[in-house]
């Protein structure tokens, strides 16, 4: 099986040994005749001359396996006709769960109330988790993983997705039920992909539906909200605080108002990362499935964008 590693050169040193260990039967190359490859391992930024990759010459390729969880920068390529699979890495899922769980607990316990300024604030005691309502926007692998971590702690977890597909043990909301999902969200965690249906989903009108003082944790995509709308909503107290790990333009400019806003915490897109040692196993499985003509895992639905 001849595979092209169509990703930036900086990724080669970490991915090449992981991929060859997970799938020793492959011949992994960094260049060659496009028509000779059975599959592509792909990440945006290839080719590195700034041009958009033309998938047309890869007439033999049975699958394009993305190294990224998000595929919004790939599905818009009109030359891509081969099956595209997104990366669902258990290591990334675990990292995202830990990041979001940490911020949910910080919000729940009100840890930011205790400034080290000599003032004894003994009257502020948080409720138990069984009284705290958490809403997760996006109930894919990441959202379901976070819900599974929150439930044993007693949080009243609900999930929202476009389909409203039921998830065992939690209240679920469908696309039309967004107002109800937001109205209950004392802590709102957003793990949505970047699609036409999610861009600008949180705006002045929808943010105003949050309970006063609610926390927003966005570790999905920065296109979920208009930045001016979010700043205005923060000034109005809905949400009361925003933890933002992703942005429409990265890195965030040094003079961006998010840095200095007292109700915003910026983290530099570190919520989770794809780890070659675990993700290579997913890629290897799909390469073998493609060669055997079996159904591919995590196949992208082009109409939905993920």
Image (cartoon, rainbow, N blue to C red):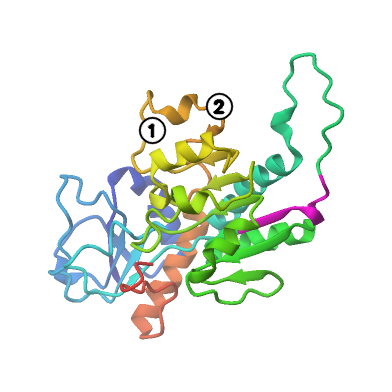
On the image, the x and y values in percent for residue 305 come to 34, 67
58 and 240: which is toward the camera: 240
Gap between marks 2 and 1 measured at Cα: 17 Å
What residue would you read off at disc 2? 262
Q: Is residue 302 left or right of residue 218?
A: left
Q: Nearer the viewer, mark 2 or mark 1?
A: 2
**Disc on res. 252:** 1
Question: Which of the image's four quarters has the N terminus?
Answer: bottom left
The quarter holding residue 302 reads bottom left
User: In the image, is residue 233 part of the stretch drawn in magenta?
Assistant: no
Residue drawn at 43 percent across, 62 percent down = 87
Residue 144 is at least partly visible in this image? no
Which element is circle 2 on? loop
Q: Is residue 261 left or right of residue 130?
A: left
Up/down of 243 relative to 129, above or below: above
Which element is circle 1 on? loop
User: In the image, is residue 133 part of the stretch drawn in magenta?
Assistant: yes
Residue drawn at 46 percent across, 41 percent down = 230
Up/down of 171 relative to 195, above or below: below
In the image, farthest residue toward the bottom: 293
In the image, farthest residue toward the top: 118
Question: Which of the image's four quarters has the C terminus?
Answer: bottom left
On the image, the x and y values in percent for residue 18 come to 45, 56
Up/down of 284 relative to 62, above or below: above
On the image, the x and y values in percent for residue 270 come to 50, 41
Q: Is residue 138 left or right of residue 101?
A: left
Circle 2: is it few (<14), some (14-19), or many (20+) Cα within 10 Å? few
Highlighted magenta segment, given as a residue range: 127-135
Total marks shown come to 2
């Amino acid at each position: 099986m001849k595979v092209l590693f169509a990703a930036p050169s900086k990724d080669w040193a970490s991915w090449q040994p992981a991929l060859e260990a997970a799938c020793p039967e492959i011949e992994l190359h960094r260049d060659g005749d496009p028509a000779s490859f059975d599959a592509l391992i792909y990440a945006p930024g290839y080719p590195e001359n700034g041009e958009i990759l033309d998938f047309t010459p890869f007439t033999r390729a049975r699958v394009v396996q993305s190294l990224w969880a998000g595929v919004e920068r790939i599905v818009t390529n009109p030359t891509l006709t081969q099956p595209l699979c997104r990366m669902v890495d258990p290591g990334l899922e675990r990292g995202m769960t830990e990041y979001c769980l940490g911020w949910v607990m910080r919000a729940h316990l009100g840890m930011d109330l205790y400034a080290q300024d000599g003032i004894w604030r003994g009257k502020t005691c948080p409720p138990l988790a069984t009284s705290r309502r958490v809403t997760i926007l996006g109930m894919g692998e990441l959202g379901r993983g976070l819900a599974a971590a929150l439930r044993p702690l007693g949080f009243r977890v609900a999930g929202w997705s476009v389909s409203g597909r039921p998830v065992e043990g939690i209240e679920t909301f469908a696309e039309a039920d967004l107002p109800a999902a937001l109205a209950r969200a004392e802590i709102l965690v957003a793990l949505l992909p970047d699609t036409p249906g999610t861009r600008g989903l949180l705006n002045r009108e929808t943010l105003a539906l949050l309970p006063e003082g609610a926390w927003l944790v966005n570790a999905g995509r920065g296109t979920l909200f208009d930045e001016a709308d979010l700043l205005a909503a923060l000034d109005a107290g809905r949400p009361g605080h925003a933890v933002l790990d992703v942005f429409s333009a990265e890195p965030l400019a040094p003079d961006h108002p998010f840095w200095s806003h007292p109700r915003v915490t910026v983290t530099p897109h570190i919520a989770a990362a794809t780890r070659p040692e675990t993700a290579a196993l997913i890629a290897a499985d799909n390469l073998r499935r493609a060669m055997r003509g079996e159904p591919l895992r995590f196949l992208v639905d082009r109409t939905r964008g993920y």
